[in-house]
Amino acid sequence: MNIFQKMMQIDRRWVYLAIGLAVIIPSIKSFDVPVTVSPEVKRIYDFVDSLQAGDYVFICVDYDPSSMAELNPMAVAIVNQAFVKDLKAIFVTLSQFGPGLVEQITSQLAANHNKINGVDYAFLGYRPYPAITILAMGVDFSVPFPQDYYGTPLDSLPVMNGIKNFDDVKGVIEITSGNTADFWLIYGNGRYGFPLAIGITGVMSANYYQYLSSGQLFGIIPGVKGAAEYEELVGFPGEGKAQMAYQVIAHSVIIIFIIISNVAYFATRKRKAGLEGGNQ
Amino acid sequence: MTPQEWGLYEYIFNGVAALLTLCIFSFLYKDNPFYKFAERLVAGVATGYFTMLLFWTNFMDKVYDPLKAGQWWYIFPAVLGVMMWTRFSKKWAWVSRYSIAFYIGIGSGVSITVYLYTYLFKQLQATIGFPITMDIAGLNQFLVIIAVLSALVYFFFSTPHKGALGFVSKIGIYVIMICFGAGFGLTVMGRVALLVNRVIFLKGYLIQLFGG
């Protein structure tokens, strides 16, 4: 058995160990990674930046704790920007595990920016069946959400005075780890035509770029790289930017493994073909 | 990363989170009781949480409270929902068909037009609706058309993929592979992000315990 055959039969746990070590190294000695901002991320930043104080922005937090690593940094960056701009933010979640995440983000950032729940922002809560909820919100926010998440009737919230449905918000930013992005595209942008942008996990990203070129989305924040770009634009370096050093090292190790395994694969295939040819 | 002001509550619950993280990671070595415990704990907690969330944000909000307030018409969707449960009985399962028919009927009526608009018309317009100009944007548009048509040809199985059709089909498979490659790269980034997030969390907890 030569070295290439041994490499083809390596225990996968050695690969896990290598990736683990690669990720631990930057945690001991981190370094700064320059982040180049993509146009699709910049467009969302520019959109929020162009709004006037008091304008409404609708933020839908549709992910669960298993996607926090990728999506929380972008949600924090967007909410930070909205609060700095003195925008009124309406939060909704269509993910069953979203309420805790929204509470965590809003309470923390509202305290930092002296924003008051019900006055500067509102969290309407969670409802299942995204299609029905989005369609109903297009008629009136109070149809699916007669009260906010904390049980206060919507008409008693100062922040909800004068707004009824999507016609009264400047745009919707959907941050999701699942198929709710499709529901927002179909029943939100498709039915009501409001400007829609999405922040999504890396796995999903390749499936949504066609909606960017068709104009159905005005921006995309793809995965943690997109989050780091947004943090760079907003000027609040957070976990997204902090993750970039780890990503560089881990990706380098993975690329080295891909090269080694391909070399080993082709070398053993050639040898195997040679042996089979000799046997005939 | 510097230690923050933590109370006993933060130390205990972050400690539990750190321990469960290590339990889940232990699966990378091999399946073991610690991993099984953590996995089932997550499933159990998630189910319990989701059930109670639905009860308070849907049954109470959308059935109990309106009925209590005299909005009697809310009884109709509630009854349709209860009728779904008759599927558990062989004798009464047919009753659930009325609920399903209602649901599918409304779903189809609402969805068909917007689905066609979102997934077909807008995409078709974006693919062929722009002029091919002699610049980068035009080249990009030309490549989009070639990519879409060749990928479609790859999935056209009514004729053998030979000659010109075989050539276009081969371009199609390259297009699909480029798409898979992009997806794979982004997936790796996502998975590494999950690992990094946990490593940062564990590092923070250790610093909190023993100082930076």
Image: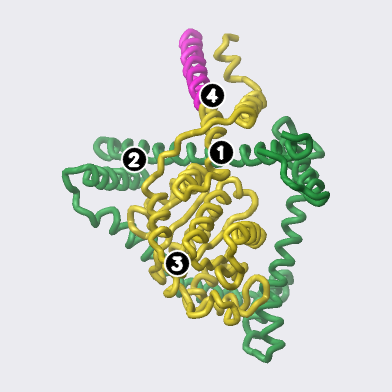
Chain colours: A yellow, B green
Chain bearing mark 3: A
Magenta residues, dominant SS class? helix
Mark 1 Cα shell of 10 Å, populated few (<14), some (14-19), many (≥20): many
Residue type pointed to by label 2: Gly
Q: Which residues are magenta?
A: A255-280
Residue at 25% x, 54% y is B128
**Disc number placed over residue A53 in the picture, else none:** 3
In the image: residue B49, left or right of residue B171: right
Pointer 4: what residue?
A257
| Percent position of residue A5, x then y | 57, 15
Residue that badge 1 annotates? A243
Quadrant in which the N terminus of chain B appears: top right
Left or right of A61, for residue B128? left
| Chain designation of label 2 | B
What's the residue at 73%, 65% (across, down)? Answer: B51
Residue kind at label 3, given as amino acid type: Ala
